[in-house]
Image (spheres, rainbow, N blue to C red):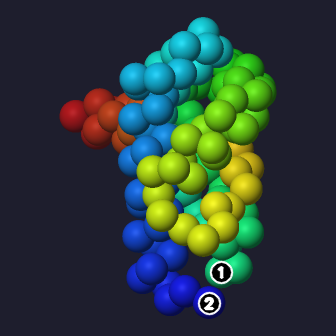
Amino acid sequence: MPSGVRLQKIADRIREEISELLIKELSDPRLHQVFVTDVRVDRELAYADVYVSALEGKSRSAEVVQGMTSAGGFIRRTLSDRVELRAFPRLRFHWDPTPENADHIEKILAQLREEKK
């Protein structure tokens, strides 16, 4: 089994490559303005959980995850050529609400600052 550092390097590389694919090679309109927020690879390298988000927020979550899942075979095949691993992990796509939550917290903090003045 790979070490934690090695797993993180693999996850970072997968995130970079998927981000590049989203920008340069994938033409699916469902994946317009989508970004990868995180990738987590399990210890056995069987699965890579890919967390995605979009500028429009949660309103597009189902559409984005469906688009990513639809393109999953192409993405996995392309990544297996670019990232050298004996067996490439299966990709599972998940919606990441973190950017929306952070925006909500920022709005609350800004409101509190205004009230304090």
Q: Is the residue 7 above or below the residue 52 in the image? A: below
Q: Is the residue 60 above or below the residue 97 in the image? A: above
Whether residue 97 appears in this view of the structure is no
- The answer to whether the residue labelled 2 contacts the one labelled 1, judged by CB atoms less than 8 Å apart, is yes
As drawn, the label of residue 43 is 1
Q: To which residue does mark 2 refer?
A: 1
Say which amino acid is labelled 1. Arg
Horizontal and vertical percent for residue 110?
33, 34
Q: In the current view of this chain or complex, which residue is farthest to the left?
A: 117
- Residue nearer the viewer, 114 or 45: 45
Say which amino acid is labelled 2. Met
Looking at the rendered image, the quarter that the C terminus falls into is top left
Q: In the current view of this chain or complex, which residue is farthest to the top?
A: 29
Horizontal and vertical percent for residue 13?
41, 57
Whether residue 16 appears in this view of the structure is yes
* Residue depicted at x 70% and y 79%: 44
| In the displayed structure image, the side of residue 73 where residue 40 appears, left or right | left
Q: Marks 2 and 1, Cα distance to the nearest angstrom?
A: 6 Å
Looking at the rendered image, the quarter that the N terminus falls into is bottom right
